[in-house]
Image: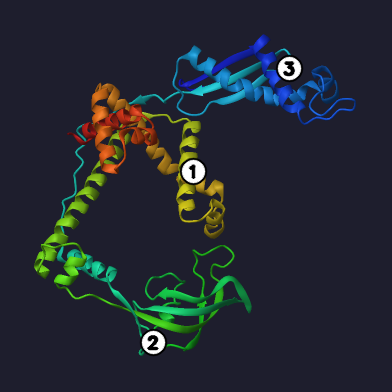
Amino acid sequence: MKKNVIVKEIKIEGEEWQKALDKSFKKQSKNVKIDGFRKGSVPKEMFIKKMGMEVLYKEALDEVVDMGYKKVLEETKVTPACEPNLNVKTINENECILEFTLITAPEVTLGEYKNLKVKKEEIKITPEEIKSEIEALRNKYAEIKVKVEGAIENGDTAVINFNGFVDGVELNGGSGENYPLEIGSHTFIPGFEEGLIGLKVNDEKELNLTFPENYTEDLKNKDVLFKVKINEIKTRILPELNEDFYLDLGYEDIKTEKELEAKIEESLKKNKEAEVEDKYIEDCLTKASENMTIDINEEILDEEIHRMIHQFEDQLKRQGLKIEDYYKFSGLTHEDLHKQMEPEATKRIKYRYLLEKVAEVEKIEVSDEEAEKQSEEMATNYGISKDELLKVYGGLETIKYDIKMRNAINIVKGE
C-alpha cells in the first residue's frame, strides 16, 4: 500500500444508527400497504415482519455515510486528493461499520525547477502573415451577392439539393434541400465540393465518391453516389482597401493601407507574444515535471480523467450535442475516450503537484489583502460585483490558490 493511502473504519451504532433506521422506515412506509392498515400507517414492527429488516439498510446507509466521512476527516485530519472509496464491512440492526480508503496528495520529490535553460521563441511577424490577416478581414466584411450568371468558383456558396446512395439505398442523413455549401470549406467528404466547381444554376450532377478511412465505422471506405442539383450560387464581393473599410474595422485614425498594415502587425505581435508566453510556460513546466519524482495513484488519475470528460460533455452541450452523439459519429466508446485523455490528465496532475510543491518549498504566501485586490480587478474586468465574482469563482481561497500557483509558475520560469 502506498504511503498516501489511509484506511479508516468508522462504527455507527446505538442511538445514531437507530435514528437512521427510523428515518428509513418513515420514508419507505409511506408507500407500503399492508392488510389491516391504512397506507403509510403500518407500525414499524409489522413493517419489519412483513418486509424484512434488510429493506431499511440502504436508506439508512445513505443517511450515515456523510456523517461517517466527517468523522473520518476529523480523526485523521487529512485533506483527500480525490473521492474516498467506501466499503460496508458490517450492517445489521445494531450497527453499521464503514471502511473509508482515503488518498492524500502523492509524495513529490522536486528535481531542478529553476535553472531549466528553456529558450523562449523569438517573435517574428512576416509580410505574408499581415497580408493573410487583412484578407481574412476583407472576407469577414465581404458582401454576399447572388450570382445570376456564371459558374461556381472556389469560395462561392452553392445552395444545393443532394441525395446520397450507398449500394443503391438512400443514405440515412445523407440528403438535404437548399443546403448552403461554401466551396473550399471542406465541409463535405473529399471530392464533393471540387465536383461542383464549374456548374451553373439548375445544373444537376452525379458524384461517384468514396468515404474516407477516418469516417464512421459503418461507412468508411465505402463507395457513395451523390445526386446534386444547384439551386442558387452566391459569391463574396470583397471590400476595397479604403477609408470606408478602415472605419468599418473601427480604425478612425487609419487613412492608408500602410497604416493598416502597421496596425495589423501590432495586433499580430500582441497575439503572438501571448502564444509564445503560453508555450514557454508549458515548456518550463514540462521540463520541471520531468525532473521531479511522483507516484500518481490510479484513483487520482481516474478522477482527473472523469473531470475532463465532464468538461468535454459541457462543451458538446453548448454545441447542441450529447456525448452519445459524439460516440456515434467518432466511433469511440467511453473506455476509448478515457484512455485517450489519460496522457493529458497525467500531465495536468504532474503540473498541479509540481507547482504546489514549489509553492511549499519557496514558502509562497498570499495575503487576504492581495486576494481581495485581485478579485476586485477581476470583477471590474468582467463587469460584475466582487461578491458575484467570488460566488462564481468559489470564494477568496480559490483566488488565493490561483495567485499562489501563478507565483510558483514565475519561479519555474526563472522570474
- 286 vs 251: above or below: above
Give the residue pinned by disc 3: 92
Q: What is the CA distance from the residue labelled 3 to the residue labelled 1?
A: 37 Å
Write the residue at 19% across / 45% down: 120
Residue 252 placement: quadrant: bottom left
Residue at image mark 2:
198
Q: Kindly identify which residue carries mark 1.
A: 310
Q: In x, y percent, where is residue 206?
A: 52, 84
Instruction: Work out which residue is located at the far top of the displayed protein and give it.
Output: 14
Q: Bin the neighbour count of mark 3 within 10 Å (Cα to Cα): few under 14, some 14-19, many 20 and up.
A: few
Q: Which residue type does callout 2 highlight?
A: Gly
Give amino acid for label 1.
His
13 vs 333, nearest the viewer: 13
SS type, badge 1: helix
Query: Dot 2 lies on which element?
Result: loop
> Going from the N terminus, do you reach mark 3 or mark 2 first?
3
The residue located at (11%, 64%) in the rendering is 254
Q: Is residue 351 visible?
A: no
Judge left or right: residue 93 versus residue 221: right
The relative height of residue 175 versus residue 201 in the rendered view (above or below) is: above
Count the labels in the image: 3
Direction from residue 220 to residue 376 in the image, left or right: left
